[in-house]
Image (tube, grey):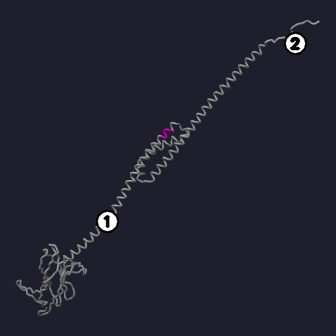
Amino acid sequence: MMANTNYPSAENPQVPNRPVKNKNNTTKNIIIGVLAAGLLGTWGYFLKTKNESDKQLQEKAVAVNSAMTARDSAQALYSLTIQRLDALTGENNTLKNQVNDNNSQINKLKNEITSLLSKRNASEADVKRAKALIAQLNQTIANLEAENARLTGENQVLAANNTQLSQEKQVLESNLQTTTSEKEEMAKTVDVASTFSASNIQITPVDEKKRGKEKTTTTAKRVDKLVVSFDVENRVARSGPADIYVIVTGPDGKVITDAAGTTLSTRNDGDRVYTYKTTIEYEQGTRKSIQVPMRQDHFQTGNYKIEIYQNGFKIAEGTRSLKKGGLFG
């Protein structure tokens, strides 16, 4: 007979009628719960941190993209500004000189703008500064454009004035040439008209006697001098000194002269060697008598030709013959 008991034996184990609490399992569950809660908290923090990091990265990316866009925009604006400057300076050499005078300021602006825009991570402040400098450079260019417009206007006015002055100069030169030509023609007319006319020409061979007595003779060996006398007058010639030239050509066809280089430039007969020159004081509108003595040691037998020049023109001419004996002519 077996005894009833609530405790199983080793040989016949039995499940107890009610559960019996196990302290080890409770501890384990608590640890697992704590770990799970911690893990969830860690994942939550990780996800939160990751979201915040992603948000920051997105914000930075937007900022970078915005900065890049602003920088690119500033770069494009700067490129257009440089093209504007190059086009402007290429149009006007005078303006180019002015740009050269302002080179220090312009180069300083260009260098600073280039430095700001060449930064890989240009900040918003850098881009803003670059745009401000570009605006300043554009203002400088605008001032140069205004100066260019002013210079262009002045050049157009000067060109128009030069054209007008050239035309007026041509007219004046034409009038001057006409006036000068007329004046020269008038002067020539007056000059020719002022040439004396000669009249009453006489050629007298004179034999000089003792005690100053003179006797007319045609015997060559007795002639001491030939006295050429004539009257001159002119109503146009002004009062004052006038030169009279006498050319005496001997029977041998040679001009009688005792001085070297005594050459007269005539208007119709070329250069002539003259025998005698006298200067008279003439009074306008009057008739003046002139006597010209011509001496030589020995007078030849034959014809002596006498020519009288004044103002380059021959105004009188005559001939006188001398013979060996007796009176001739």
Residue 209 position in % (x across, y down): 7, 86
Question: Is residue 281 in view?
Answer: no
Q: For the residue marked with disc 2, what is the amino acid?
A: Gln
SS at mark 2? loop
Quadrant (top left/top right/bottom left/bottom right) for the C terminus = bottom left
Front residue of 208/277: it is 277
Which residue has dot 1 on it? 171
Quarter residue 20 falls in: top right
Residue 48 position in % (x across, y down): 64, 27
From the viewer's perspective, tell me whether residue 129 is left or right of residue 174: right
SS at mark 1? helix
Q: Which mark is residue 125?
A: none
Secondary structure predominantly adopted by residues drawn in magenta: helix
Front residue of 94/185: it is 185
Residue 294 position in % (x across, y down): 14, 82
Question: Is residue 157 in view?
Answer: yes
Front residue of 267/254: it is 267
Quadrant (top left/top right/bottom left/bottom right) for the N terminus = top right
Q: Which mark is residue 14?
A: 2
Q: Is residue 182 magenta?
A: no
Q: In this view, does 60 lie above or below 233?
A: above
Q: For the image shown, how many numbered marks are present on the structure?
A: 2
Distance of mark 2 from mark 1, alpha carbons?
Answer: 149 Å
Quarter residue 138 falls in: top left
Q: For the residue marked with disc 1, what is the amino acid?
A: Val
Front residue of 283/160: it is 160
Q: Does the magenta stretch include residue 130?
A: yes
Q: In this view, does 90 lie above or below 109?
A: below
Span of residues in magenta: 127-131
Q: In this view, does 243 lie above or below 216?
A: above
First in sequence, mark 2 or 1: give its number. 2
